[in-house]
Amino acid sequence: MKRNFRCIIVDDEPNAIDLLKSRLKLLFPEADVVNSFVKWDEALPALRTNDIDILFLDVSMPEKSGMDFLKLLPDYPFQVVFITAHSEFALQAIKLSAAGYVLKPIDDYELTFAITKALTNLANKSNGKTDNNNNNKLKIGIPNAKGVDYLNAEDILYFESVNKYTKVVTNEYSIMSSYNLGEFKKILNADTFFQAHRSYIVNLYKVKRYETSGLLVMDDNMQIPVSKSIRNEFIDEFGRISRTAGLKSKD
């Protein structure tokens, strides 16, 4: 039997609140909407005093954005799912550790995915698992026109700049994001990912060959150039995660 979960909805459009309630009733009958608010200043005290599991939050509200509103609740214990008509704030949502970013009009699959992820996060937290636990794989959110795709960081081979967009490549497929390469660099783990060229950020663990001409060969056989000015830096960085015959290993 599924455990009931408690949630609050904050959206300045009453019709949007009603629509979300109807989708929750259909998709997650165990969802208990304890309250809903069209004004952020009325929602703030309720969120500080109510024990809830998920907050469904609109991004664009009068006087204060959903992002700014969330900053008024430091160390919030609940999961956050943004429900919005604006796709351009998806990366900010990821930085705020949101469980999901669902675009209006609401797609049932995207909503189900976001809520399932939120409930999984809550279950892991209650079981004492954290993001630092080796049993949990780091997820990287890839914002695109339909929402956010979450990939295991270990599955990503490289990020490639394509005009003002970014192509995220795995062994199985690639995803095109409307965010530029610089935005991804801000959220990537520097211990795993390295910007080898102005157009490429590579997963160091997916490099299978380095050629003295300055080319990297990735697991999918893609050849990626390493900028001349940072080749020594790359070799030093790669030496941190590898051991090479004939070279002194770094402690």
Image (cartoon, rainbow, N blue to C red):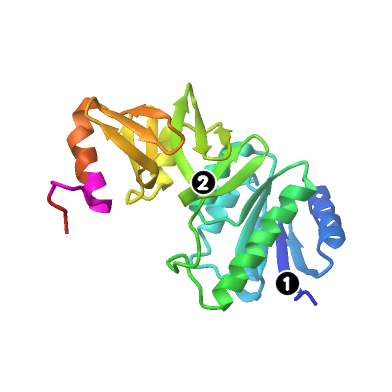
Q: Position of residue 116 (x, y in %)?
A: 69, 61
Residue 178 is one of the magenta-drawn residues: no
Q: Is residue 104 above or below residue 133?
A: above
Tell me if I can see residue 202 in this picture.
yes
Please, what is the three-letter code of the amino acid marked with disc 1?
A: Phe
Q: Is residue 227 above or below residue 157?
A: above
Residue 242 is one of the magenta-drawn residues: yes
Q: Residue furthest front?
A: 245
**212 left or right, relative to 26:** left
Q: Secondary structure at mark 2?
A: helix
Q: Position of residue 181 (x, y in %)?
A: 43, 33
Please, what is the three-letter code of the amino acid marked with disc 2?
A: Gln
Q: Secondary structure at mark 1?
A: strand
Closer to the camera, 79 or 64? 79
Q: Position of residue 50 (x, y in %)?
A: 66, 75
Residue at image point 66% right, 70% down: 53
Residue under label 2, please give it: 92
Residue at image point 21% right, 29% down: 212
Crowd rating for badge 1 (residues with CA inside 10 Å; few <14, some 14–19, many 20+): some
Residue under label 1, please give it: 5
Determine the image quadrant of residue 133: bottom left
Residue at image point 39% right, 41% down: 185
**217 left or right, relative to 111:** left
Whole-angstrom CA distance, mark 2 to mark 1, is 26 Å
Determine the image quadrant of residue 18: bottom right
Determine the image quadrant of residue 201: top left
Which residues are drawn in magenta? 237-247
Residue 132, label in figure: none
Crowd rating for badge 2 (residues with CA inside 10 Å; few <14, some 14–19, many 20+): few
**234 left or right, relative to 208:** left
Tell me if I can see residue 13 in this picture.
no
